[in-house]
């Protein structure tokens, strides 16, 4: 059956949350400042022992069903993919939302807030198709940049964003006080 992708109303977030947002962390990028950062950074991939499961929805208040309690979603977009009647993937885009620091109060920047593909449908190009739809959604609102946040422990996502044409624009090793071993990566796609 052909995969159908399209925009949905925000009320779909409750069902959107049924798609797992977890993955096995087996490798991570290690970021080492050279000369205290004055000579740049060195990045290398190293194995994680033992591997562990990271679930973006696990921390209380982080899942899609909780987003409306934390942010004004009135300008957000939800794009979902269906295999027949089964929801298999989705992307959420934040735009024109003053509470989202990554947007810097600008209306010409959007952020890929979330992208997820059901484990049984991964590695089939759905992520790229969702990203393309999300990019078009963003362009239609006059945006000049599309930002994405991920972490050094999500090596597959980093490679994915690079393949989509994004550039690694910021590295913040102090972004997650509760997760000191994780480093924030901000990717930017110029539109």
Image (cartoon, grey):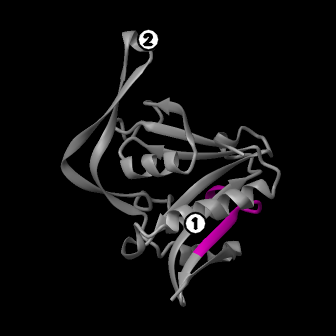
- Residue under pointer 2: 39
* In front of the other: 18 or 25: 25
- Residue under pointer 1: 129
Residue neighbourhood size for the residue with mark 1, other residues' Cα within 10 Å, grouped as few (<14), some (14–19), many (≥20): few
Residue neighbourhood size for the residue with mark 2, other residues' Cα within 10 Å, grouped as few (<14), some (14–19), many (≥20): few
Magenta residues span 69-80
* In front of the other: 184 or 81: 81
On whether residue 72 falls in the magenta region, the answer is: yes
Can you give x and y, in whole percent of width and height, for residue 136 in the image?
A: 72, 60
- Residue at the left extreme? 50
Residue 22 at least partly seen: yes
Q: Is residue 138 left or right of residue 59?
A: right
Q: Is residue 100 above or below residue 65?
A: above
Q: Residue at x 50, y 89 (%)?
A: 1
Q: Is residue 90 above or below residue 148?
A: below
* Secondary element type, mark 2: loop
Can you give x and y, in whole percent of width and height, for residue 11 in the image?
A: 67, 76
Q: Which mark is residue 121?
A: none
Spatial separation of the CA atoms under disc 1 and disc 2: 38 Å
């Amino acid at each position: 059956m052909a995969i159908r992708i399209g925009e949905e109303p925000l009320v779909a977030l409750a069902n959107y949350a049924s798609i797992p947002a977890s993955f096995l962390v087996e490798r991570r990028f290690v970021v080492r400042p050279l000369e205290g950062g004055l000579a740049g950074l060195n990045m290398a991939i190293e194995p994680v022992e033992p591997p562990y499961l990271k679930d973006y929805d696990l921390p209380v208040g982080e899942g899609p069903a909780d987003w409306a309690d934390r942010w004004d979603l009135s300008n957000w977009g939800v794009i979902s993919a269906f295999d027949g009647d089964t929801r298999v993937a989705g992307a959420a885009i934040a735009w024109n939302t003053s509470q989202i620091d990554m947007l810097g109060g600008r209306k010409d920047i959007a952020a890929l807030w979330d992208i997820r593909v059901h484990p049984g449908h991964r590695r089939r190009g759905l992520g790229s198709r969702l990203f393309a739809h999300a990019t078009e959604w963003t362009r239609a609102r006059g945006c000049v940049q599309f930002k994405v946040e991920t972490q050094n422990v999500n090596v597959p996502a980093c490679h994915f964003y690079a393949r989509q044409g994004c550039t690694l624009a910021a590295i913040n090793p102090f972004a997650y006080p509760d997760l000191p071993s994780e480093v924030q990566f901000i990717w930017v796609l110029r539109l």
